[in-house]
Amino acid sequence: MTESNTQDLREEFNRWAEAGRGEGMEQDHLPITLPVLEMMRLEPRDNVLDVGCGSGWLSRRIAEKVLEGRVVGMDVSDQMVRVARRTSAEYDNVLYVTGEVGEIPWEANFFTQAISVESGYYWPDPAAGLKEISRVLRPGGKFWMLINYYRDNPHCHQWGALLAVKTHLLLADEWVERFSGSGFTEVAHERVVDPSPSPEIYTGRWFRDAAQLRAFKAEGALLVHGEKS
């Protein structure tokens, strides 16, 4: 993928921001994200990078746990970053930057942890993104990637045709290989099941019907995590 793919991403998520879709991400993704925040065991002095921060909902939650540290939310969409800044004005320890994961605008060895929720499959070059995340992490720093779109879950494959930008539909083992090849050790993956209730009748565009939505949630989101050596 090329620079044009990054521009396509920026334009698409700018449209999402203008349509107010960033604000709904917390409701959609919080049920699978809360367990990951528990696993991270955040400390008050941690510096945390939120890759693909959108409207900043996760950055704000993390900021409440690292009161003596710093949270940097980064998104390819400058419009999303504007929304995040506006809705995070009362948080002194959060900073938002526009940038793409293949070229993170931050110094090396700064962050103690990094997290990305529902972003990884959009990255133009996942391996390059993982290497950049490794670069900005301190030795021993951990990265947590949580995604709902991956090949092992057959109930999400139809999303690719519905999205306006290119995506990567990878197996969990393929993500592990990319983590391991990008400077991460102790790489592991697991599923995080979405416990939220499903409607009796589904009328959205992402699933065939309510039964498929329930099957999708039962498979769970994919969490891949590793440590910078």
Image (tube, grey):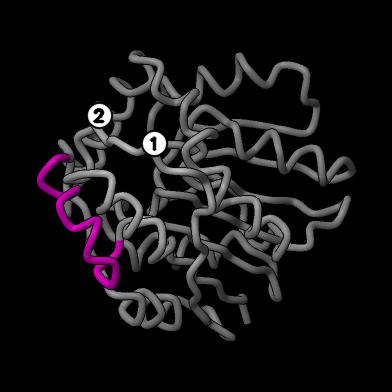
Q: Magenta residues, as a range?
A: 150-162
Residue identifier under label 2 = 12
Residue at 45%, 83% (x, y): give it: 180
Query: Where's the C terminus, which quadrant?
Result: bottom right
Q: Residue furthest left?
A: 161
Report the side of 22 relative to 40 (left or right).
Answer: left
Q: Nearer the viewer, residue 114 or 109?
A: 114
Report the side of 194 relative to 150 (left or right).
Answer: right
Task: Judge whether residue 80 is colored magenta.
Answer: no
Q: Is residue 166 above or below residue 218?
A: above
* Amino acid at dot 1: Val
For residue 76, the mark is 1
Residue at 15%, 52% (x, y): give it: 158
Kindly state the secondary structure of the residue where label 2 is placed.
helix
Picture coordinates of residue 202, whole percent (x, y) = 27, 36
Residue at 24%, 32% (x, y): give it: 204
